[in-house]
Amino acid sequence: MCEACPIIDWANELPTIRSFTPTRIVSEMSDFVVWYDRYDAAQKHLVGGKNASLGEMMRAGLPVPPGFALTTDAYGMIWRDRDLVDGVNGLLRALDHDDFAHNRDVSTQIRDLIENTPVPDEVVDALDAAYASLCRHCGVDDLPVAVRSSATAEDMPDASFAGQQDTFLWVCGLAAVIENTRRCWSSLFTDRAIAYRHQTGYMHTAIAMSVAVQKMVDPIASGVAFTLNPTNGDRSQVAIDASWGLGEAVVSGEVTPDNFLVDKVLRQIVKREISVKLVEYRLTENGVVDKLPIETDRQTRPSVTDDDLIAISMLARRAEKHYGCAQDVEWAIDRHLPPGENVIMLQSRPETVWSQKAVAPVATGGRDSLSSIVSTLVSPLHHKSTS
Amino acid sequence: MGGNDMTSKRFPSPFEIEGPEGVEGWEELYPYSVSFGEARREYEDQRFWFWDSMHWGQAMTPWDSTFFEIAIATLSQMNSRHYRIPPADGIDFRVLYGYAYLSPVGVDPSQIEARVPQFIERAGHYFANWDELYSNWLVKVKDAIAEIETLDFSPLPEMEDLSIITEGLAVGSGYRLLSHYNRFKDLILKVWMYHFEFLNLGYAAYLDFFGFCKQAFPSIPDLGIAKMVAGVEVDLFRPNEELKLLAKKAIDLGIARAFDDPQNVQLEGDAGAAWQAAWTEVEDPWFNFTSGNGFYHFDKIWRDYPEIPYAFIKDYIAKIEAGDDISRPIEAITAERDRIVEEYRDLLPTDEDRGAFDGKLGLARVVFPYVENHNFYIEHWTMSAVWRKIKELGATLAKDGLLSADDDLLFVRRDEVNEILWDYYSNWAVNAPTVSKQHWEATIARRREIHGKLSKWQAPKALGVPPEVITEPFTIMLWGITSESVSNWLGSDDDVEGVLTGMAASPGVAEGPARVVFGPDEIGEVEEGEILIAPITAPSWAPVFPKIRACVTDIGGMMSHAAIVCREYGVPAVTGTGFATNRIKTGDRIRVDGSSGKITILD
């Protein structure tokens, strides 16, 4: 039994609803949903990191799939349920931080509790309206969406105590959206997340969960793009890894992707290496994403066209310019969009390796042009085409 | 493939090469100092020699070789004696079985440092005063051309003109002929010194800019750098622009159909006269333009062979009538260049770097007009005048029975001509028979035969020991000779069947049937939509580029004319493949990727 874990007054301690009074709940009902195309940085604390990033990208005019965030206020609403509060508090006090198996058990129970607590009508209505609107916007009934956790971590540097970043793909219909939303909420209480918060002394109420609901892209091909050459840090190049199907294969390393180098400025492909691609993650007939083998003729065919490559690199460059630093971008070619409009951005985050290195000037100080010419002549310059 | 293999591999020695059969005595077509020989064997055997097929792709007559020798010697003096390029002296040169071979001479490492302050002082003066010196240069060159054109090789008269008496001149036509010939030789040497006056400094400035960009962006394609340096308004493209204007004029005057047969253009009536006047206004200097590269006796000059530019005009007329826009999109080219500069500059890490970039690019742009234009002023305009004079002299000697045919003179060495002129003058003075025709008949016949056989021989690409390192700026920038290209010549075991590589000289990908062309006389065979394969192209081939889908050459670097012209005309190109004209046959379907430098033979 853990005496260190306090009894939590959820209704009053969750930051986002700390300010809630019954009257405010009524007037802020519409705040349960923040659409990406209307996102504002002031809303960051309501939508969590992932949603904030997607919203920012969309507002910057980058082609992210349409979607919305279910705010932390929605999450806060379930904690008005006395049964949930009492149940979770009781379970938390039952934790034994030296007994992993026991804690896994406790975690499972907490998660079950959360996932089975009735979702308040206001939240259901908001989700219903938003999802229906998204379906209409995309012209598809029961639009397949990705449902992802997007936790807030006010002033907290590390995502580890926010729980796994759960992603649920190919979710169709409101019922499934709600079900997966609850799973995202409960992911704050995996055993690892609980343990981590305990160890670092953070309150379980210090973090709240927002949920990202975004149109699912059915990709012909997908991959990653770095806005610099990862082998030598050359910032005039975009390095692209690509393979068939969903990006999971590339990101996880299960497939050796096709690799390209594109010159950002000339907008030309300067290097190509086509690999033998054996597996892909794709949507099967049962409406489920599965890992499947690739048929022979597609294994050695380039997974992207030259036009795709130029579009991807231009997109990555736009993200780089927007954020003001080198980016690591996840992209996909949407099977259902027309060529020329089918390159989608799924994620963009700062590149971490070369950006951390000290920026050394190319020119050494104090050299006039003539000395530089002498130096170039005296240290022989071999002209090779790019390797 | 790679640097490590090079020292174990070498090319054949010049002394191991067996020339074609039946060419004994070929060495006499050239001065004795340009032949390989026992006296210098130890020196010659240890060097690296490459065949300069870019400029001298065919076996040379004595007068062809004259310009080869003068060009290389004058290039060399600038490095070694004028500017004291620290690591590089001149380029040694030889003729082997009629073909031109070059060997860059490096400076002994212990001497390099001492040359640095000398170079700084001398090159510094030119960089600091470039624009003024370049303006003066234009004046000097035009004066030299004007003087060449006043040289008089007309036949010696039956009687001297009365003015020689009334003006008390005493010095007559014989002196005129002999001294004008000597002056001719002097002027040729002089203009070639002008040709190289700035050139290596220009290349050194390019190299500096290139080097900086490669350091900042290790994977940047050479093409990207070249695009930033490229100028837009250069005199070199003017002849082609004038052709386009004349095509338009023909349409406006209603005489477009007159050009349907370029061999037989009849310009009639007022419209014809008006068009002719427009031509006359621009032909000097702009149509002092050679169809080749200016170095060969058989190169045809537009003014003397108007059917050549007429054929280009016909093509332009067809395009205009079909509604195509034939104008050079200058605004688009400039905008694109400026965009590229801005974006690369933006990607540089520090403000200090941006300052250095601006400085180096600025200098590269200062030197660019000269680097581009000298080719028009010397190789085209001057050499047009020079070859005309040689032909004039040849015709005079044939007419007055010193030689049998107008072009016999081409087979006489420049130093030998003086003896013919002496025979001519002295026996004209005496009024007695000359003897040169009989004296030269058998020799010239023999030399023609030898030259014919040499012309059919396949010259080896390189001889001797591959270099550790290449420092001479021309060798790198113009000929595109790098350790990598040398390695290609050595023949890599990694060669993939049906794939050639070279420099990615002009971006884009194209597929189509190949047309292999060895010289300007064959470019008429090129058809719409074909891919041109040639040892090298010349600026005067520019009108062919609207027809072709892509261009591939055997030799040439990033700043060679083939590369520059292809980029200007937006045609994908791969240069410096080494042996494309060997590996590809007319009719082969090929794919050319000018962005990566790869050519694939499809079938």
Image (tube, grey):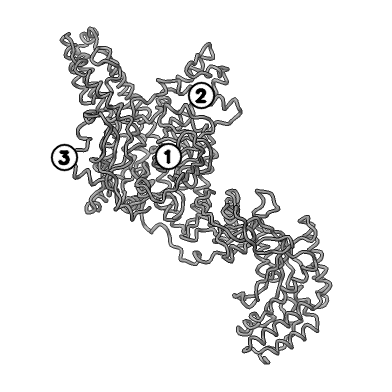
Q: Earlier in the sequence, mark 2 or mark 1?
A: 2
Q: Secondary structure at mark 3?
A: helix
What residue is rendered at 33% in x and 25% in y? B297
Q: Is residue A181 visible?
A: yes
Q: Position of residue A300 (x, y in %)?
A: 56, 53
Q: Are marks 2 and 1 on the same chain?
A: yes
Say which of marks 2 and 1 sits in front. Answer: 1
Query: Which dot marks residue B313?
Result: 2
B140 vs A307, nearest the viewer: A307
Q: Position of residue A177 (x, y in %)?
A: 77, 68
Q: Position of residue A51 (x, y in %)?
A: 68, 66
Three-letter code, disc 3: Ala
Query: Which dot marks residue B583?
Result: 1
Say which of marks 3 and 2 sits in front. Answer: 3
Q: Earlier in the sequence, mark 3 or mark 2?
A: 3
The Cα atoms of the two marked residues, 3 and 2, are separated by 54 Å
Which corner quadrant of the image does residue A224 belong to?
bottom right
Q: Are marks 3 and 2 in contact (CB under 8 Å)?
A: no
Q: Are marks 3 and 2 on the same chain?
A: yes
Question: Which residue bears the numbered disc 3?
Answer: B39
Q: Is residue B136 visible?
A: no
